[in-house]
Image (cartoon, helix red, strand yellow):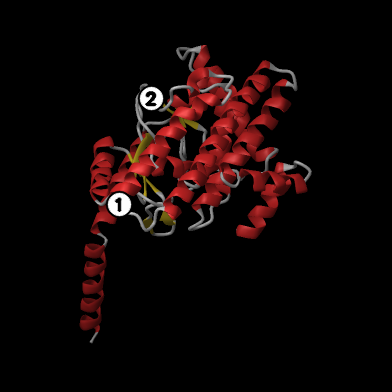
């Protein structure tokens, strides 16, 4: 009897493994990529004490430690072992993010993972693997997008390092990405990716402003420069979010039309949205001509819904706490713990 039970358990396990073989292989690949980065990361304190290391690098890393400490002590984010180490990318991207969307609906393609739930993007440490999966989705008719990732969070499970490419950002942007990822390690709601990303983006920006203000002062060049960057970012986000509404209306209006007609009207509207970007006033000219080489598609527009569509409501929530981010984080943690 005992032997039969063990045999039955073995058969069930084999069936489960075979049914999830692709997910298992993917998990092994991602685990190896993450392990390689962690294994080759260097403690920041070792770099700071090494006389052979350049002062510019030391200064940037000291700055990251200040941001990290501020995020925990002043913003109420969880203490963890994140961002005490440094990984040199050698100037090359090391992670790519694949996302996809329905062709005539602003609806994301979802990947399902144990514990994490449904995710509207998938990471790859090898670009070729990302391209292969993208090509399969394109064959099925999905709009797709691959982008490089300069920072990510393992939700406090592993020791996330500071990446060398992160240090190429200005002070405000660097503080923002660190705080953004630490928010993920503090609050993560399964199957609520839009809320998770909107919250991290909002707290990242608000927390970075507060840090720069407290660290350098109200009239500091660092704060003023970052505020100008945020002004441009806000204008771009609002313009693209308005574009998502236009596309959504078009898809609803053309539901009964032939697919080729829907595609023509979709392409025409996206070209119009892209060309009219030059009517928006920006402080930095980098936004002009941003779509000259590649037009956006649904997967691109979906990113603005995923990361920024709830920021106004989150700003209203923060106002109820008199702008106190730590109090807001504390309440959210107690609510979703």
Q: Residue at x 55, y 19 (%)?
A: 284
The x and y percentages for residue 151 are 46, 35
Question: How many tags in the picture?
Answer: 2
Alpha carbon distance from label 2 to label 1? 26 Å
Residue placed most toward the observer, 337 or 278: 278
The x and y percentages for residue 296 are 39, 36
Q: Please tell me in which quadrant of the rendered image residue 295 appears.
A: top left
**Circle 2: element type:** loop
Q: Quadrant of the C terminus?
A: bottom right
**Circle 1: element type:** helix
Q: Please tell me in which quadrant of the rendered image residue 230 appears.
A: top right
Around disc 2, counting alpha carbons within 10 Å, would you say few (fewer than 14), some (14 to 19), or many (20 or more)? few
Around disc 1, counting alpha carbons within 10 Å, would you say few (fewer than 14), some (14 to 19), or many (20 or more)? few
Asked whether residue 300 is in view, the answer is yes
The x and y percentages for residue 282 are 57, 22
Decide which of tag 2 and tag 1 comes sooner along the chain: 1
Q: Residue at x 52, y 46 (%)?
A: 245
- Name the disc covering residue 292, or none: 2
- Name the disc covering residue 88, or none: none
Question: Looking at the image, is 106 positioned above or below residue 230?
Answer: below
Asked whether residue 81 is in view, the answer is no
Q: Residue at x 71, y 49 (%)?
A: 317
- Name the disc covering residue 259, or none: 1
Q: Residue at x 23, y 87 (%)?
A: 1
The x and y percentages for residue 153 are 47, 42
Question: Looking at the image, is 162 positioned above or below residue 144?
Answer: above
Residue placed most toward the observer, 190 or 37: 190
């Amino acid at each position: 009897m005992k032997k039969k039970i063990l045999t039955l358990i073995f058969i069930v396990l084999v069936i489960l493994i075979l049914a999830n073989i692709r997910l298992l292989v993917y998990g092994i690949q991602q685990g190896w990529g993450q392990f390689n980065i962690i294994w080759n990361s260097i403690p920041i304190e070792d770099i700071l004490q090494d006389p052979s290391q350049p002062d510019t690098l030391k200064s940037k890393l000291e700055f990251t430690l200040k941001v990290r400490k501020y995020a925990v002590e002043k913003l109420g984010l969880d203490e963890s072992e994140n961002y005490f180490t440094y990984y040199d990318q050698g100037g090359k991207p090391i992670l790519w993010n694949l996302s996809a969307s329905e062709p005539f609906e602003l609806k994301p393609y979802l990947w399902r993972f144990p514990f994490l739930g449904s995710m509207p993007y998938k990471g790859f440490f090898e670009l070729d693997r990302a391209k292969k999966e993208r090509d399969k989705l394109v064959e099925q008719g999905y709009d797709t997008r691959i982008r490089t990732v300069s920072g990510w969070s393992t939700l406090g499970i592993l020791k996330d390092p500071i990446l060398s490419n992160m240090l190429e950002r200005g002070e405000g942007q660097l503080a923002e990405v660190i705080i953004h990822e630490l928010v993920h390690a503090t609050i993560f709601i399964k199957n609520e990716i839009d809320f998770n990303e909107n919250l991290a983006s909002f707290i990242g920006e608000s927390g970075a402003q507060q840090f720069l203000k407290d660290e350098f002062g109200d009239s500091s060049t660092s704060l003023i420069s970052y505020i100008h960057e945020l002004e441009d970012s806000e204008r771009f986000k609002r313009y693209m979010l308005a574009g998502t509404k236009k596309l959504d209306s078009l898809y609803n209006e053309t539901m009964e039309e032939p697919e080729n007609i829907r595609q023509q009207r979709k392409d025409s509207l996206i070209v119009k949205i892209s060309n009219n970007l030059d009517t928006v006033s920006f402080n930095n000219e980098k936004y002009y001509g941003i779509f000259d080489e590649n037009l956006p598609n649904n997967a691109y527009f979906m990113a603005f819904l995923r990361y920024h569509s709830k920021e106004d409501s989150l700003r209203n929530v923060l106002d109820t706490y008199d702008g106190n981010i730590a109090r807001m984080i504390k309440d959210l943690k107690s609510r979703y713990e």
